[in-house]
Image: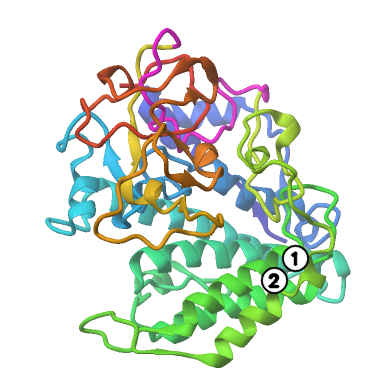
C-alpha cells in the first residue's frame, strides 16, 4: 500500500535558512495522508484531479499567458505596444519576424509552464487508470483529464508545431528525458489531440454541475477546432506552407458544429456581455467552457486571471498609468468597415482608414472590441478617448486604438 507525500519541506527549510530540517519534521503532526486505495475510490479521486484544474490558474503569467494575447502580434490585427520598441523586445522581434530566439523569456517560459501543467494532468490520468474502469464517475473524470491534456498539447502545438507529447501512462524520469518532438508527423500530432478529445466526447455529460468541468459540447467544439487546423495540411517541412486541404477533416468540422450538439447554449442579447467583468456575466450562455478563477479565497490577491493586466491603456484621472501593450492595429479596425448594405467592405487602394466622424459605416461590434479615439472609454464613459499621449504610452508609435479590459488600481508600468 503506497502513501503519497509532498516532498518540498526540506527545500523550504534550506531556503529559509533552517538547518535542523529533521528536527522540524519530527515536531510536526501529519494532517492527512492519501493512500493508494483511497485514490481509487471515486469519492476521493477529485482530491488528486483538482491539481490539474488548478494548473490552469496557478501557473498563469502576464508575460507567458494562456490567453496568448502576446503571441497575437504575429498576425496583422495587433501591435506589441508598450512604451517603445525595446519594451518587451522579444515580442517586438516576433512581430517583425526576425531575431527570434527560443531562449527568450516569453517562449521558454510558456513552454515550461505548459509542461508543468501537463505533468499534473498526466499524474491524474495515471491515478485514474488504477481505479475501477467500469465506474461511471471514473470514466467521466478520465474524459475530463483527457480534455485538459488535449488543451495543453493544442496550445503548445499551434505555437511551436513540433512538440513532445506527454501521452503515455506511468512515465518515469527516463521516459521524459527521451521524449522527442519528432515522434509524430504534423498530421499525427493533431491526431493525438483528436484521440484525447474523441475519448472525452464519448463519456462527458451534456451538463456539468460544476462550471469549470468540460461538457460533451465543449469536447465537440474543441474537436471542430482541431480538425480545422488539421485539415490544412503543411506537408512541406521547408516552407510550412499549406500544401493541401483535406475534405474528410472539414467534414468532421461540420459534424462537430451541428447545432443539435449545442442546445444548452445560445447567443447573448448583447455581444458585450461575453466580456464584461461583472460576476453576473460569467459563464454566460455563449460560454461553452471557461477556466474558473476565484477571489476572497484566503490568498493575497485571489486566483485571478493576471494575463491581461499589461493591456490597460493610460486612463486619465483613473490611475494615470497603464502598460498599454497589445494595441489593436489599423488593419483590425478597418476590417470592421461595411458597405451600404451592412456587409464587409471590399476595400480598394483609395479606401480611407476608418475614423470616428467620417462618412464610413462600420459593424457596431467594433466598439465592443476596440477603444476608438472619439468614443468614451468603456469602464469610465465620462472620459473620451483621444489621439493624445494621455491615451498612448508610446506617444502614438503604436497608434491610439486601445483594448478594453477592466482597469486595476495598482499601476504596473
Query: Where 66 falls versus 220 (above or below)?
Result: above
**Looking at the image, which is closer to me, 182 or 240?**
240
Residue at image mark 1? 217
Residue 341 appears in the picture as rendered: yes
Evaluate if marks 2 and 1 touch, with contact meaning CB atoms under 8 Å apart. yes
Residue at image mark 2? 220
Q: Residue at x 42, y 63 (%)?
A: 156
Q: Is residue 119 left or right of residue 217?
A: left
Measured in 3D between alpha carbons, the distance from the residue under mark 2 to the one under mark 1, in whole angstroms, is 5 Å
The disc at residue 48 is none
In the image, residue 132 lies at what x, y percent? Answer: 83, 72
In the image, residue 363 lies at what x, y percent? Answer: 53, 48
**Looking at the image, which is closer to me, 141 or 10?**
141
Q: Is residue 41 left or right of residue 327?
A: right
What's drawn in magenta, residue-wise?
Answer: 296-318
Residue 392, quarter of the rendered image: top left
**Looking at the image, which is closer to me, 152 or 8?**
152
Whether the magenta-drawn stretch holds residue 191 is answered as no
Counting other residues with Cα less than 10 Å from the Cα at mark 2, is it few (<14), some (14-19), or many (20 or more)? many
Chief secondary structure of the magenta portion: loop
Q: Is residue 306 left or right of residue 271?
A: left
Can you say which quadrant of the picture contains the C terminus? top left
Q: How many numbered marks, from 0 up?
A: 2
Counting other residues with Cα less than 10 Å from the Cα at mark 1, is it few (<14), some (14-19), or many (20 or more)? many
**Looking at the image, which is closer to me, 393 or 226?**
393
Residue 186, quarter of the rendered image: bottom left
Query: Where 346 falls versus 90 (above or below)?
Result: below
Amino acid at each position: 500500500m503506497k502513501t503519497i507525500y509532498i516532498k518540498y519541506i526540506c527545500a523550504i527549510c534550506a531556503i529559509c535558512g533552517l538547518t535542523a530540517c529533521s528536527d522540524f519534521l519530527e515536531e510536526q503532526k501529519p494532517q492527512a495522508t492519501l493512500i493508494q486505495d483511497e485514490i481509487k475510490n471515486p469519492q476521493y479521486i477529485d482530491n488528486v484531479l483538482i491539481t490539474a484544474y488548478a494548473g490552469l490558474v496557478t501557473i498563469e503569467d502576464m508575460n507567458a499567458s494562456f490567453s496568448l494575447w502576446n503571441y497575437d502580434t504575429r498576425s496583422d490585427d495587433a501591435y506589441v505596444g508598450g512604451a517603445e520598441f525595446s519594451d518587451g523586445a522579444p515580442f517586438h522581434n516576433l512581430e517583425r519576424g526576425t531575431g527570434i530566439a527560443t531562449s527568450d523569456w516569453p517562449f521558454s517560459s510558456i513552454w515550461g509552464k505548459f509542461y508543468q501543467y501537463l505533468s499534473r494532468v498526466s499524474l491524474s490520468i495515471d491515478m485514474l487508470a488504477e481505479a475501477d474502469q467500469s465506474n461511471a464517475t471514473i470514466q467521466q473524470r478520465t474524459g475530463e483529464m483527457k480534455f485538459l491534456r488535449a488543451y495543453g498539447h493544442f496550445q503548445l502545438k499551434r505555437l511551436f508545431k513540433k512538440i513532445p507529447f506527454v501521452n503515455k501512462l506511468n512515465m518515469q524520469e527516463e521516459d521524459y528525458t527521451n521524449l522527442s518532438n519528432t515522434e509524430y508527423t504534423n498530421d499525427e500530432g493533431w491526431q493525438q489531440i483528436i484521440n484525447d478529445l474523441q475519448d472525452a466526447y464519448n463519456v462527458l455529460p451534456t451538463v456539468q454541475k460544476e462550471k469549470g468541468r468540460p461538457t460533451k459540447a465543449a469536447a465537440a467544439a474543441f474537436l471542430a477546432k482541431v480538425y480545422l487546423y488539421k485539415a490544412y495540411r503543411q506537408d512541406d517541412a521547408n516552407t510550412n506552407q499549406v500544401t493541401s486541404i483535406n475534405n474528410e477533416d472539414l467534414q468532421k468540422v461540420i459534424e462537430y458544429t451541428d447545432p443539435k450538439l449545442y442546445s444548452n447554449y445560445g447567443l447573448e442579447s448583447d455581444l458585450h456581455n461575453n466580456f464584461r467583468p461583472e460576476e453576473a456575466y460569467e459563464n454566460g450562455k455563449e460560454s461553452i467552457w471557461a477556466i474558473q478563477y476565484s477571489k476572497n479565497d484566503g490568498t493575497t490577491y485571489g486566483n485571478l486571471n493576471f494575463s491581461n493586466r499589461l493591456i490597460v491603456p493610460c486612463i486619465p484621472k483613473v490611475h494615470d498609468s497603464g502598460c498599454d501593450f497589445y494595441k489593436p492595429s489599423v488593419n483590425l479596425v478597418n476590417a470592421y468597415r461595411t458597405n451600404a448594405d451592412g456587409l464587409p467592405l471590399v476595400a480598394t487602394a483609395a479606401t480611407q482608414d476608418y475614423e470616428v466622424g467620417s462618412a464610413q459605416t462600420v459593424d457596431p461590434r467594433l466598439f465592443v472590441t476596440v477603444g476608438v479615439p472619439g468614443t468614451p472609454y468603456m469602464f469610465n464613459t465620462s472620459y473620451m478617448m483621444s489621439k493624445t499621449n494621455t491615451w498612448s504610452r508610446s506617444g502614438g508609435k503604436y497608434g491610439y486604438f486601445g483594448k478594453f479590459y477592466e482597469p486595476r488600481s495598482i499601476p504596473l508600468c
